[in-house]
């Protein structure tokens, strides 16, 4: 799978770990930054990564900041993006099954590395159910005819 990743300074360390894990799993990874722990602004990295999903340069994106919320705010206005903040194994699964999310937003300061990696693995391997009730809700939420 082609996956875009991006972080701000708070998510930088986990982004670097995640990049290696994804590459070892055989994914292609496009890193949109940031490139250090130096303070930076999450939209500068999250927006281009989310746009790469809309442009079909990447199938999905994983965005990491301190709590995941800033990155989700950055990604949510990108056409064709369904961004979700995940905070448990259950939400990692359900955001794919029920919402067909294509952008995962994680809070690096909220969870340990093992938990974050579990969330990513579940999110990457869970398929969308395709049920009409979920499609109907997604169409309403995005205000689109899917």
Image (spheres, rainbow, N blue to C red):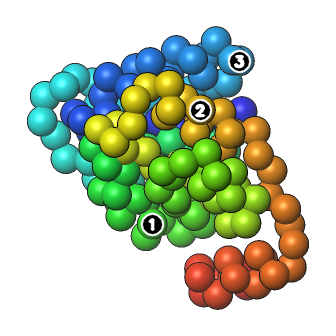
Q: Residue at x 47, y 56 (%)?
A: 85
Residue at the spot of label 2: 118
Structural crowding at the residue carrying mark 3, measured as other residues with C-alpha within 10 Å and reported as few (<14), some (14–19) or many (≥20) = few
Residue 51 visible, this angle: no
Label 1 belongs to which residue? 76
x and y, in percent, of residue 110 in the image: 34, 42
Quadrant position of the N terminus in the picture: top right
Q: Quadrant of residue 119?
A: top right
The x and y percentages for residue 77 are 43, 70
- Nearer-N-terminus badge (1/3): 3
User: What secondary structure is marked by label 1?
Assistant: helix
Label of residue 26 in the image? 3
Residue nearer the viewer, 136 or 35: 136
**Is 59 placed above or below 28 here?**
below
Circles 2 and 3 in contact, beta carbons < 8 Å: no
Q: Nearer the viewer, mark 2 or mark 3?
A: 2
Q: Residue at x 73, y 66 (%)?
A: 98
Marks 1 and 2 sit apart, C-alpha to C-alpha, by 23 Å
Q: Position of residue 94 (x, y in %)?
A: 68, 58
Instruction: Answer left or right for 112 relative to 138.
Output: left
Residue at the (24%, 35%) spot, across then down: 10
Within 10 Å of the Cα at label 2, are there few (<14), some (14-19), or many (20+) other Cα atoms? some
Q: Is residue 79 visible?
A: yes
């Amino acid at each position: 799978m082609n996956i875009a990743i991006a972080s701000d300074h708070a998510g930088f360390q986990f982004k670097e770990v995640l990049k290696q894990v994804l590459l070892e799993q055989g994914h292609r990874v496009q890193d949109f930054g940031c490139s250090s722990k130096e303070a930076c602004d999450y939209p500068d990295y999250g927006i281009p990564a989310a746009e790469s999903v809309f442009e079909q340069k990447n199938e999905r994106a994983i965005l990491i900041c301190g709590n995941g919320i800033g990155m989700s705010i950055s990604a949510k206005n990108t056409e064709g993006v369904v961004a979700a903040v995940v905070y448990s194994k259950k939400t990692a699964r359900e955001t794919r099954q029920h919402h067909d999310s294509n952008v995962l937003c994680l809070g690096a300061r909220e969870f340990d590395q093992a938990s974050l990696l579990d969330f990513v693995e579940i999110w990457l391997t869970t398929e969308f159910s395709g049920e009409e009730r979920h499609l109907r809700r997604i169409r309403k939420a995005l205000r689109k005819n899917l």
